[in-house]
Image (cartoon, rainbow, N blue to C red):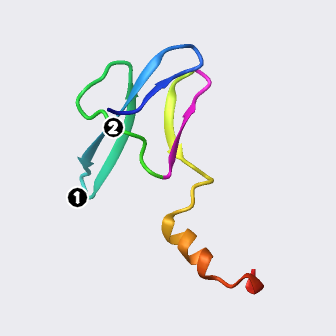
């Protein structure tokens, strides 16, 4: 079961993702929305959020409020006096 988003206009979109190899050999993950459910239906990646453009199209973008588990652990180790 993947992520589905209903935009402000009432149209439902499904999130899809796939791994692509670039010409330089690096592997990137691409996420995109489609109206129909296809192969590669996935959930929202950790640290990302869904936003809408002016036209009502959903996009995946980095969540500015996301704190990685490593950063949270480091912040918990710092004594309160130094903050």
- Residue in view at x 57 percent, y 49 percent: 63
Q: In the rendering, at what x and y percent does residue 32 appear? A: 39, 34
- Residue in view at x 30 percent, y 33 percent: 41
Q: Is residue 18 above or below residue 67?
A: above
Q: In the rendering, at what x and y percent does residue 55 appear? A: 58, 20
**N-terminal of the two: label 1 or label 2?**
1
The mark found on residue 42 in the picture is: 2
- Report the quarter where the C terminus lies: bottom right
Viewed as shown, does residue 70 lie left or right of 54? left
Choose top left, top right, bottom left or bottom right for residue 67. Answer: bottom right
Residue stretch in magenta: 47-55
Residue 27 is one of the magenta-drawn residues: no
Q: Which residue is mark 1?
A: 25
Q: In the rendering, at what x and y percent does residue 61 appear? A: 52, 43
Label 1 packing within 10 angstroms: few (<14), some (14-19), many (20+): few
Label 2 packing within 10 angstroms: few (<14), some (14-19), many (20+): some
């Amino acid at each position: 079961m993947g992520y589905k988003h209903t935009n402000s206009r009432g149209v439902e979109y499904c999130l899809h993702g796939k791994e692509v190899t670039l010409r330089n050999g690096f592997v990137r993950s691409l996420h995109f929305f489609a109206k129909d459910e296809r192969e590669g239906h996935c959930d929202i990646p950790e640290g990302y959020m869904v936003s809408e453009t002016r036209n009502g199209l959903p996009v995946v973008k980095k969540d500015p409020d996301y704190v990685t588990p490593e950063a949270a652990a480091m912040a918990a180790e710092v004594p309160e006096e130094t903050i």
